[in-house]
Amino acid sequence: MAITLPSIEIIFKKLASNFIERSERGIAILIVKDDTNITFTTKTYKKTSELEADIALYTATNYQYIADTLSFAANKVVVVRIATTETMTDALTIIESTVKTGWITTVGEAADYTTIINWVKAKELAGETYQTVVYNATTPDNKHVINFANTSVVFNDTRATQTGDKYLPSLIGILAACNVDRGSTYFVCNNLLAVTEVADNNVALNAGQLILINDFDNVKIGLGINSLTTFTATNVEDMRYIDTVEAMDLMVDDIKNTWSNDFVGKYKNNYNNQILFISAINTYFKALTDAEILDNGYKNYADVDVVTQKAAWVLIKPEAETWDDATVRNNTYKRIVFLGGDVKILGAMENLKFNISIF
């Protein structure tokens, strides 16, 4: 077997996941092209007052985009500044070295969004959890890509009517603010007066497009979905919902960080030490249950994956085929920890069916 760096393979299926402390999420990452001040590449803001102190660093247009992102109270907004002659690839290289996860967008051209989409997809394959909101992309079909579709919006300030791409900074602010705590369906876009609705809401939704709707005096997100439209055994239909993927990513980030920081290389691979790790995960699941991220009516547990561990032993020790579960658990396999689990992620209330009988 080839020697590689220690790794964790986390595979999500509809009813299975392996995942410890809740990670910091709710990060909006806004890429701007701006030559006003070239002494920095990133700035981080948590409050509008912090941005106001930096007003001289940006063009008026970029300053407004940043203010829009901040206005929805995300955990923090990371501004990635590149020169007007630089590309999205340059910006993504900066992100890769400075921010572990977050919601990425820019107000740019179709080619910019394609670059970001391809990068986010590659990061997903590598087990990383960046997400992006892009504008009118052609069938991105990915659970970490949100494809915004409305052609125009009407801001409630002097900007008035603008093309839909100008709302992308607001959308990453909204989604970062929603985080794992609530769904984004019917979130009120309080910096808008109206929106030009898509021709057919249902067609757009089934094509994996995020749409805004006019709902009396408010503009709202119609349904909190990403662009995933091709469903498989590992990308099931539930994963089309943004809040489900946020909860999945939360657990992936937490388990990876805790494993890498607190366990790799520090403990021998015996059953007692595996139990330490498993107990920590199950305590974490309990915390997520209390926070209504996981369902308190479900077991939500992690344990040794005896089936996979036994199969690994059988390949080199055929008599392992006769081992019972207890024997498998006590015979840890080389330097690998095989875990399995079962959790139920809570989705937000979105649909109501209410039958009333009248006598």
Image (cartoon, grey):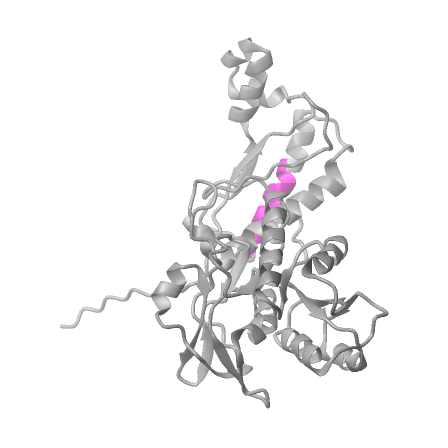
Q: In which quarter of the view is residue 328 placed?
A: top right
Task: Give, as a single range, the part of the protein colored magenta.
Answer: 278-290
Identity of the residue furthest to the top in this view: 319
Above or below for 121 versus 68: above
Seen from the viewer's position, the closer of residues 57 and 314 is: 57
Percent of width and height locating residue 195: 46, 80
Percent of width and height locating residue 187: 49, 72
The residue lying at 51 percent from left, 13 percent from top is: 321
Seen from the viewer's position, the closer of residues 348 and 237 is: 237
Percent of width and height locating residue 71: 63, 77
Q: In which quarter of the view is residue 172 placed?
A: bottom right
The residue lying at 54 percent from left, 87 percent from top is: 160
- Predominant secondary structure, magenta span: helix
Left or right relative to 355: residue 177: right
The residue lying at 75 percent from left, 42 percent from top is: 261
Identity of the residue furthest to the bottom in this view: 158
Percent of width and height locating residue 348: 45, 61
Residue 283 falls inside the magenta stretch: yes
Q: In which quarter of the view is residue 127 placed?
A: top right
Left or right relative to 171: residue 65: right
Residue 276 falls inside the magenta stretch: no
